[in-house]
Image (cartoon, rainbow, N blue to C red):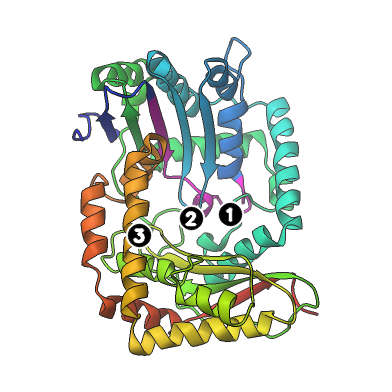
Amino acid sequence: MNAPLSLDVPVVVNHEPRLRTTSLCFALGFGARHDPPGSSGVAHMLEHLVMSTPFPDGLSLCERIEHRGGECNAMTGPESLVVHAQVLNEDAAEVAEWICRALLDLRVDQERLDTERRVVLQELSAAASDDADAVQEAFLGRLFAGHPLGSPVGGLPGTVSGLTVDSVRDAHDRALRTAPFAVSSVGGLTEEALREALSVAGLGRMARGAVPDPGLGSTGGVPGPLTPGLVERWPDEFCWMLVGGRAPHATDPRRHASAILGYLLGGSPASPLYDRFRNQDALAYSFRSWSRSYSDTGAWRMLAGCEPDNAPRLLAAFREVLDQVAVDGPQEQAFLAAKRQATVEAVREAEAPLDLAIVLATQRLLSERVWDADEEIAALKAVTAEQVRGAAAELSAQLIAVIRPEGR
């Protein structure tokens, strides 16, 4: 893997001549936690506008890429807005220029804003009607109560309805002036061709640091203490439960132990939680666990769907298994399986060009280092059973649980 290009904006290139496609990722460090007060959802709106606003020829970014046979998408998270595409090598330089122009030269008018507002409101309505989605939003709101990280990524219907052309333009301008930015490319596109495309698109006018300062603007700084709390009222219908707590931040060495704890208590048949939920007590058919790191904190989650009579028993069983790991540490066979699963996931990301491009760009926003699969795998393999026990103990001490639909 080559070092970042000598541009003001970090650009990471993994040139693979054997590949016939190139995967591109443009990551802007402007997400829901950066939405200005009263404009919740504006980062998500920018994502929609970047993808849908027509170029002078009348075609939007996504239409242009799809007409070339490529695939593209975008996503907004708590700390980033990401646009990615996978195209044939012969189209990659031009597509990189298009994405860059769409991000830098976004033109917002009332008609386009009103159109995308209707789309976003439909998206919010669909998410609110799906308890598996709604519980995740409620969990983060509880985990980071009173902090911008707890804000709904898509915004609220009221705040989205209140967005104006000026407020969206102001947010876009602030993002370009203050947010970190990173670009990655994996595949057949050469470094020189990518450099030329980005220069033509005007990327050189963005001078950005590699690491965002979580204490600036509306990011809220490091979240305050968490008050543990579990479910008090249970629903009388099928429900989704999210149980978890805070996790280490993106550059904390303890994040690897937290990640392995997610696999240890995940939905794999090798997990002791699977044995308890599925084999012993038949409490849930579908569940999974994962740890996600942000710039200054993180979130560890276990999501499960269950019948109403099983819900209290499922929460009690989860706490029992978690506490057992927190006291005694993981059993050797399950621990080794969890480490192996985490390693395989890192290998998959490294060997899937589009996944790798996304990881390279998004991780570059969080750290001055370029993500390296070998380093990641070595760090996962070095995690000890005692470190996982410690991660379980920290989680157990600050556990919260949220359920949707709510009990009456």
Do the CB atoms of the residues marked 2 and 1 lie less than 8 Å apart?
A: yes
Which of the pair 187/31 is nearer the observer?
187
Question: How far apart are the alpha carbons under marks 3 and 1?
Answer: 38 Å
Instruction: Report crowding for label 2: few under 14, some 14 to 19, many 20 or more residues within 10 A (C-alpha).
Output: some
Do the CB atoms of the residues marked 3 and 2 lie less than 8 Å apart?
A: no
Which residue bears the numbered disc 1?
A: 37
Q: Which of marks 3 and 2 is nearer the N terminus?
A: 2
Residue 248 visible (yes or no): no
Relative height, residue 228 to residue 369 (above, below): below
Q: Residue at horizontal 28%, vertical 21%?
A: 195
Residue 33 falls within the magenta-colored stretch: yes
Residue 27 visible (yes or no): yes
SS for callout 3? helix
Report the number of numbered marks. 3
Counting from the top left corner in percent of width and height, residue 70 is at 51, 22
Relative height, residue 326 to residue 81 (above, below): below
Q: Residue 384: which disc?
A: none
Q: Which amino acid does label 3 sit on?
A: Ala
Residue 402 falls within the magenta-colored stretch: no
Q: What residue type is labelled 2?
A: Ser
Between label 3 and label 2, give the one nearer the viewer.
3
Relative height, residue 213 to residue 118 (above, below): below
Which residue bears the numbered disc 3?
A: 342
Q: Which amino acid does label 1 sit on?
A: Pro
Q: Give the range drawn in magenta.
A: 22-41
Which residue bears the numbered disc 2?
A: 218
Kindly give the residue lying farthest to the top in the view shown: 57
